Image (tube, coloured by chain):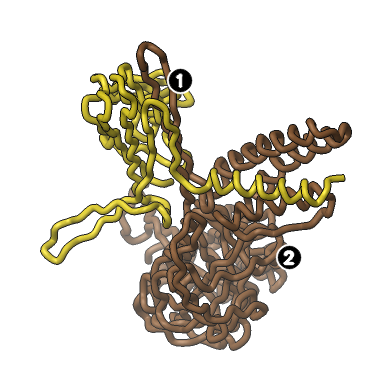
Chain colours: A yellow, B brown
Amino acid sequence: MKTQKQKTLLTILIFAFSVFVAMGAYAEEGAIRFSNNAFKQVISKAADGTVQYDYIEPSLVLPDDVILYEIVFENISGQEISNIVINNPIANNSVYRDSSAAGDSTDITFSVDGKNFAAAGALTVKDSSGKSWQAKPEDYTAIRWLYKKALKPGEKSKVTYKTSIK
Amino acid sequence: MFFYSVFCAVFVNKNLSGNGREIILKNIRYNLGLCGFGISMMLKIVAANNKVGDTVNIVKQYFNIFTALIFSLLLFSSNVFSAAGDLISNTATISYDLAGVPTMTNASTTFTEDRRVNFVVAASNGGLTVPVISDMTDAVMQFIITNTGNDTHDFLIAAVNTSPNPFGLPADYFDPLLGTVQTFVESGVTNGYQAVEDTAVFVDELAPGVSSTVYVLADMPTVVIDDVAAVVLIAQVAEGGSPGIEGAFINADDNGRISPDSAPAGDYGNGATNVPAGVSTINADTLGMETVFNDPAGLNIEDLSTALVTDIVGNGQHSDAGAYQVKSPVNIVKSVTVIDTLGGNDPHSGATLRYQLNVTVVGNVAVDDLVIVDAIPANTTYTDDSIILNGVSQTDVIDLATDYSRAIDILSKPVVSIEVDLSEGGVVAIGSGVTNTIIFEVTIN
């Protein structure tokens, strides 16, 4: 039989964990300050016909909405950092949007199984009959960016891509 | 999400203390079973640890609870039935070398997929009016409701008279008999309406992308051929999550949009469920799940909401109209083949004309006392004993119990017409879709 104190502590811990999981972006820090943020794309048309793209907090997200992921990495150490590779599995309920992955000084590859990565167009998937087809963007399950330079102390860079909500 | 967090904390702790309290939470309806699996796993772990009951195991309990809770959350996000309310989690990983030492770091972001209420009602009668006959009872009109949103819902249904005729002309002219319009959902094992099987009065647990068939039944007044009565089926969104139980109506979203009162159209479920007009409220967007009405407007002016005005976009309702049209319940297609005396098809004197009548009952009810009479054309002479019914030769005289065909007047001649009693003296009802083929021959004088 638990004491009231134990139960109260348990409640607080579970509550804190749930809030932690639910609150959205969080990052870990080491030599690199690393963050991952999601934004909902909002398109508006001005009176002169020009189209404006805004990116806002994803507080109201519905099927077919476009989400921009912005992954920022900053060298907060006093030394150069090399061999930087960023991996990002496509989120649940989401489909990668063709040609949206970007990142300065990066080689971008994709995967349909989360293990093997290749350039867009070089990936294949098999249908139920065993026939292989060129993978479509909606088949991608993960993206990998290989940062080709060394990141100097204080230097910051980012990679981005977009998904559509299913 | 705040409420979800509170829910997890309270739910888990209450159950650990053995209260067995039932908690129903609106925004996890379908996920509850999956969550329950994760939590039951957690409870088993805790129960095992409680047998030991020392301080070390209390710490273990907390660790195991978190493990199980993570499992529950993963199950939440992998729900295959609907996406609304799912946490969409994304974790990026960066690996790098610092002074030759490999290092790896993660960064995550999570938000909630909100609930888009979207569905479509469409008349499903082959793109045509529903043929009826005067004074017909329980004339069946069919509709399809498709859930195009991202959550499982119940749908409340009501049918009401409307105008104009969705098919254009002739103009909507009459209404079904007052108080006879009913709605039922296909809920049996046999397709098509059966009074015994299809007794459900609301659409139950319609998952995203899935359709359900709804039948409107109505009694016809005394009317004449070609008259039209337009009827509209209106569907109202309601909560899913409790199979077999009519879900609570959703008459307002979080964006200020509302549904109108159902009373003007006569309430849902054949008058059993009133849905009052919603109260317009604009709630701030949060990281939790919001509900957004996104249902389309009625396609045409006769596609009404329960306010009896044309259905507007985003009111938690959608509708479509069909029409009953009075038609002959019997369709006859007549054709002729010329067989001349030389084996060709030249209609010269002495040539035979073989007439064929394909008689089909249309509509959705059987026809009684169906007697076919066809006059012998001028300048032709009936060929004795030439009547054939469904491939079986008939006699020219009345010989009931053997056949029900005759040539009038075979005894005094000339024969002026042939007559075939398909109902065999009023005994046989001719079912809808059944075709009887009658053949007879004449010669050209």
Q: Which mark is residue B178?
A: none
Q: Quadrant of residue B274?
A: bottom right
Q: Quadrant of residue B159?
A: bottom right
SS category of the residue bearing label 1? loop
Image side of residue B295 versus residue B143, left or right: left
Closest to the observer: B340 or B157? Answer: B157
SS category of the residue bearing label 2? loop
For the C terminus of chain B, the image quarter is: bottom left
Q: Quadrant of residue B138?
A: bottom right
Report the residue marked by disc 1.
Answer: A130
Q: Position of residue B291 (x, y in %)?
A: 49, 63
Closest to the observer: B137 or B79? Answer: B79
Residue B226 seen in the figure: yes
Q: Report the residue at 52% width, 47% height from top.
A: A22
Q: What is the tally of numbered marks visible in this picture?
A: 2
Q: Amino acid at mark 2?
A: Val
Residue B227 seen in the figure: no
Subunit ID for the residue under disc 1? A
